[in-house]
Image (tube, grey):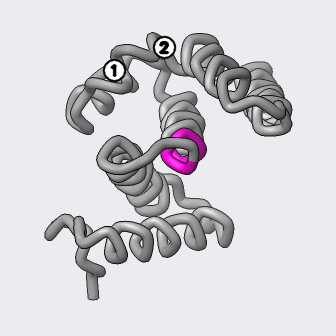
């Protein structure tokens, strides 16, 4: 029960901090705030910028099992938000990382999220428009 309370508090704190970061007026201030959120909630910013999805998943394994999906969701949100602030090809790479994490969460969390589904669809559209649709992104039937 205490672990569940801790996770819920952590998630609320994360999303509140993310909202505050997005409210900053200057791009440089938003970028700095995002870097700090990576460091505080998931780990070294530099690692997550260079990591493959396989490396990300290995790193997430370091967290207790009951935190893994939530940490993935935080990371996916950070990738998603940062992608919206960057230009191609970095934005496309970040959107792809967010997409892969959101899809994993959608499949393995056991919880349906309309907001997550909308983000998945939005990312699919953004990447299609950029002519960079990865074959692994094709919809499963």
Quadrant location of residue 71?
A: top right
Give the alpha-carbon distance from disc 2 to disc 1, as whole Å. 9 Å
Marks 2 and 1 close (CB-CB < 8 Å): yes
Q: Nearer the viewer, mark 2 or mark 1?
A: 2
Vertical side of 60 occupied by 127: above or below: below
Dot 1 alpha-carbon crowd within 10 angstroms: few under 14, some 14 to 19, many 20 or more: some
Farthest bottom residue in view: 141
- The answer to whether any part of residue 75 appears in the image is yes
Say which element carries label 1. helix
**Is 7 drawn above or below residue 117 in the view shown?**
above
Please check the rendered image and state whether residue 137 is part of the magenta-colored stretch, yes or no.
no
* Residue 43 image label: 2
Label 2 vs 1, first from the N-terminus:
2
Q: Is residue 104 visible?
A: no
Q: Is residue 116 left or right of residue 22?
A: left
Magenta segment main secondary structure:
helix
Q: How many marks?
A: 2
Q: Where is residue 27 shown, x and y percent of the image?
A: 68, 31
Quadrant into which the N terminus falls: top right
Residue that label 1 marks: 59
Tag of residue 101: none
Q: Position of residue 132 (x, y in %)?
A: 23, 65
Task: Look at the image and give the residue range highlighted in magenta.
Answer: 80-84
Mark 2 is surrounded, within 10 Å at the Cα level, by few (under 14), some (14 to 19) or many (20 or more) other residues, namely some
Q: Position of residue 20 (x, y in %)?
A: 85, 31
- The residue at the point 34 percent across, 52 percent down is 92
Q: Residue at x 27, y 80 (%)?
A: 140
The location of residue 89, given as percent across then percent down, is 30, 47
């Amino acid at each position: 029960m205490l672990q569940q309370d801790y996770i819920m508090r952590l998630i609320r704190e994360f999303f509140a901090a993310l909202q505050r970061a997005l409210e900053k007026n200057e791009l440089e201030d938003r970028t700095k705030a995002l870097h700090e959120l990576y460091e505080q909630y998931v780990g070294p910013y530099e690692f997550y910028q260079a990591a493959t999805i396989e490396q990300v998943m290995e790193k997430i394994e370091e967290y207790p099992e009951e935190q893994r999906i939530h940490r993935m969701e935080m990371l996916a949100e950070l990738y998603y938000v940062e992608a919206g602030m960057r230009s191609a090809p970095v934005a496309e790479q970040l959107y792809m990382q967010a997409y892969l994490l959101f899809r994993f969460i959608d499949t393995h969390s056991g919880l349906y999220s309309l907001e997550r589904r909308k983000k998945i669809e939005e990312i699919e559209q953004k990447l299609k428009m950029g002519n960079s649709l990865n074959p692994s992104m094709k919809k499963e039937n």
